[in-house]
Amino acid sequence: MKLQRNGRSKALAIGAMALVSSLSLAACGSDDNTSSSTATGSAGASSSAAQIACGKGGQLLAAGSTAQTNAIDVWKAAYGAACSGSTITYGGGGSGAGVQQFNQGKVSFAGSDSALKPAEVDASKAVCKTGQGINLPMVGGLISIVFNVDGVDKLVLDGPTVAKIFDSQITKWNDPAIAALNPGVTLPAADIQAIHRSDDSGTTANLTGYLAKASAGAWTYPASKTWAGKGGQSANGSAGVSAQVKQVKNSISYAELSYAQTNNLKSASIATGASKPVEATAANAATTFAKAKIAGTGSDLALSLDYATKEEGAYPLVLVTYEIVCDKGNKADTVDTLKSFLTYTISDAGQQAIGAKGYVPLPKELTTKVQAVIPTLA
């Protein structure tokens, strides 16, 4: 199931960039990023609705990743406009909470920004009576290092510096390590207010995965959903940390790009070893996704992402949100609607719709693989 190199990688890159280039034509969904259970259909939602094959109806319960909440809102609006007999209810709570609820049989699918661990797969077999939980990549995104620093509009950071900031080894904005990355920028002699997630978070898992690979040993903790760095403040969910950065002067945190855009937060560029720092844009994240490899087996499509990439224009801090479902043993009364909803979300229309909200449409070769698995769910 691994993606082959050369021709297939080139095809991935072309597919990813083609989707990203179409974002300006794909502004589906409302500009309202609130997470209400009911959504009114906009012109974009109505357009997408025409392409949706509805299931048998009923209520579909899901929970998990807050990074994908804005994407789910867009999809709910379009799906609800097409399928009036179906209700999609998504509760955030973070990736850890979502996986826990899935393995307790409380939701039909969970959103997680990190793939299931072996122990979580084993636990899923009690719920997926004739199968097990699998990872279906659905939402591509990037993690912005968001900041609110007096007098600073643009900021460059690298892996070691980000690690030291979030582990309280660098505590002042005018620290020589930050100054060296930002020549000509007047940095205040102010204390850094570092903010991390308080809940178990797939976004945290991806950030710490990046730090473990790209910090030259400055980050001494393993990649994990649970925050391990020293010091700092904490807030719940992507919305929580974003709101804190917006309110607190001289602060820094990490959040999915959609939340950075919604809150009008500035995002740092990342020095990767390429010829110039890489900006936090969907196009630059797409370059990284184009080189992703499938690490899962069978119908499990967990990805291996290269956090340490030094390729020109490749933004390293990416994440993918998986929808966690049973390959076999899904709830009989909702499996039809589950398959219908996921078929829409992984479609070109579904992927392009969330591209307008700061997400990264997944490469065509990857979406084709997901589209092949969904009809086999039972």
Image (cartoon, rainbow, N blue to C red):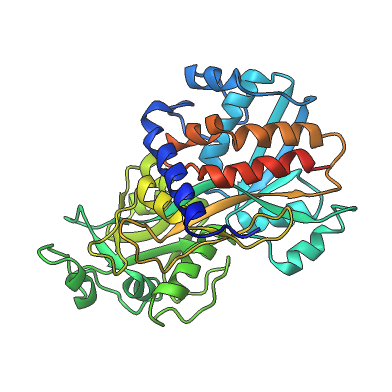
190 w.r.t. 324: above or below? below
Residue at the far left in the pictured view:
184
Identify the residue shown where x is 51% and y is 79%.
221
31 w.r.t. 305: above or below? above
The percent coordinates of residue 14 (x first, y second) are: 43, 44
In-image side of 155 versus 210 (left or right)? left
Identify the residue shown where x is 42% and y is 60%.
317
Quadrant in the rendering for residue 342: top right
Quadrant in the rendering for residue 99: bottom right
The percent coordinates of residue 106 (x first, y second) are: 79, 47
Residue at the far right in the pictured view:
130
Residue 324 seen anywhere in this rendered image of the structure: yes
Residue 129 or 241: which is nearer the viewer?
A: 129
The percent coordinates of residue 206 (x first, y second) are: 51, 63
The percent coordinates of residue 42 (x first, y second) are: 50, 19
Residue 359 seen anywhere in this rendered image of the structure: no
102 w.r.t. 47: above or below? below
Image quadrant in which the C terminus is located: top right
Residue 16 or 113: which is nearer the viewer?
A: 16
Identify the residue shown where x is 51% and y is 58%.
292
Image quadrant in which the N terminus is located: bottom right
Residue 110 or 34: which is nearer the viewer?
A: 110
In-image side of 49 versus 150 (left or right)? right
All told, the count of numbered labels is 0
Identify the residue shown where x is 13% and y is 67%.
183
289 w.r.t. 264: above or below? below
